[in-house]
Image (spheres, rainbow, N blue to C red):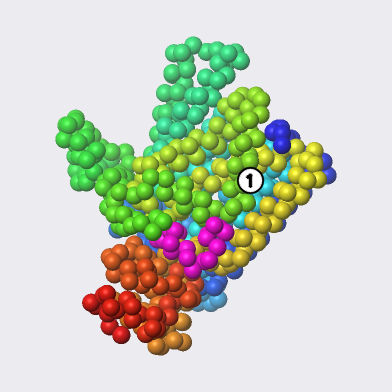
Amino acid sequence: MTHKRQDLATPGFSVKTQNVIALFVILAFAGVNVLSVLRNFAITTDEDKHYLYGEHIVSGDSSRFNPSTMPVTGLNALPKKIASFLGEGQLKYWLSKYSVARMVTIFFSCLTAYLVFHWARSLYGFVPALCSLILYVLDPNIIAHSQLVTTDIYTTSTLVFAFYTLWKFAHERNTRNGLLCLFALGLSQLAKYTAIVLFPLFLGTLLVYDLSLRNKSVQAREGINHLIFRYVKYAVFAITASILIINLGFLFNHTFTVFGEYKFRSGLFQKLQTNLPALRSLPVPAPYPYLDGLDYMSDVEKRGAGAGNIYLLGQVRTGLGFPGYYVIASILKVPIPTQIIMLLALFFYFTRKGFSADFLKNEMFLAVTVIFYVIYFNFFFKTQVGIRYYLPVFPFLYIFSGSLFAGWEWFSITKKISSLALLVYLFISVLSYHPYYLSYFNEIVWNRMHAYKYLADSNVDWGQDRNELDEYLLKNPDAIYKTRKVRTGTIVVRINDLVGVTTDPSQYAWLRDNFEPSDMIGHSYLVYKITTEDINPLCATIISCNE
């Protein structure tokens, strides 16, 4: 399969027709998400705090009660705020529903889906872009988190938008592209603190791009002093614009608080206060809750205090984490056909002649985020509680994967049939989990009741099935939930409790190590049928056995 740059126009499809086809796919994606939301699944573990902070933001108060919350969730609270100004009626009632708040996230994920399509089309043409779009909309992890009031999809969206605008600016250095790039960079800072790495990544990526062209154009052959001045100017513009946008997002809450008045927790900021007395009297141009939250999250992540017990492949750890955790999680939770397509795209791209010139010009802007986050999350990040933190790498990989289908019109019948077969497999695999996308595992985990043997936490169980648990317990009053003793009967246990993420790992060891579940509620509660005959051999060795 050859890699060949494509024009937007594809034989038989005008640009308008291409957009209509992409829009149809995105609307189908939105429909799947809306149908899943309307089943009224329970509020997940973190949604309440994100939504509450969003309500505070739209009410004019950006003061923090939880440092992981960010202003971007004010968008989710906006429909309810609008409803507060309306008279009684159906519109007010509808806008106030929690499901509508979730639909705001769906809308932004749809915008990201189109950006994936648009960027891939600019690089490889229509058919490759359509394949990139399909990989995005049929990512069960993307689908799952597109339905929640959290910052994960917003982080993913703003990072893709930011690097797309950087790519545009690198190729066309005009005011419009520059302002758009500055806006995207600043916007990303309102979604999650990990976006702070975009400052060095932006400058480094752009510098590599410019240096690769130094011998190819008059502009590129500028003196080193001029190049340094240009990048100092870029840095000043980037920091200034971002500080302004951060202030707008946090409503200028105690901006210019003197540095010495902050009560820092992390070693880094405490050392700055102690070792650099000159800083203590300087006013900080950022809002107080922004820097205070950055300090808090830095301290939590360094100590691993926010993760609790971390679970992977049957092992439980506290604080330390597992090197390669997110790679393993991806192998299990990214659909197999998607993984095949990504690997083939990598193989054919990097084995063709002359790829390096194209890479520095285009694919480098996709690769930078992927490379950084793969290294950071797998080997330095200690909050290993779910693949949701890893979502930002996938859209970039999906855009790149479109390169596999460049030159589609020249593919043999065998290659076309094989490609379509993979996409059909992808469709069936993902939709078979509807509407339980949060708990999706690919066919490596063939028995869905055994997912707990591989991963836990928000990969499987984020509290989303509590409503179904309540219904089950109502219909089965003899079922025993959260037992602390070895016993017979119908026992219902939450996956995170079973494996020791939210409990002492020894509490359910008797159940976990000796029995297999017979049923499940949703995908995050397991049902065990324990008879006297089953438990007698175990009771002979366990003192706390109580039939």
Q: In this view of the protein, can residue 172 be seen by the observer? A: no
Q: Is residue 452 magenta?
A: yes
Question: Compared to 53, does 193 lie above or below?
Answer: above
Q: Dot 1 lies on which element?
A: helix
- In the picture, the quarter occupied by the C terminus is bottom left
- In the picture, the quarter occupied by the N terminus is top right
- Residue drawn 55% across and 32% down? 364
Question: Compared to 228, does 135 lie above or below?
Answer: below
The segment highlighted magenta reads 441-459
- Residue drawn 31% across and 38% down? 285
Relative placement, left or right, of 274 versus 409 is left
Q: Position of residue 77 (x, y in %)?
A: 45, 62
Q: Image quarter for residue 315?
A: bottom left
User: Mark 1 sits on what residue?
Assistant: 341
Q: Position of residue 477 (x, y in %)?
A: 41, 88
103 or 122: nearer the eye?
122
13 or 137: nearer the eye?
137
Q: Is residue 439 magenta?
A: no
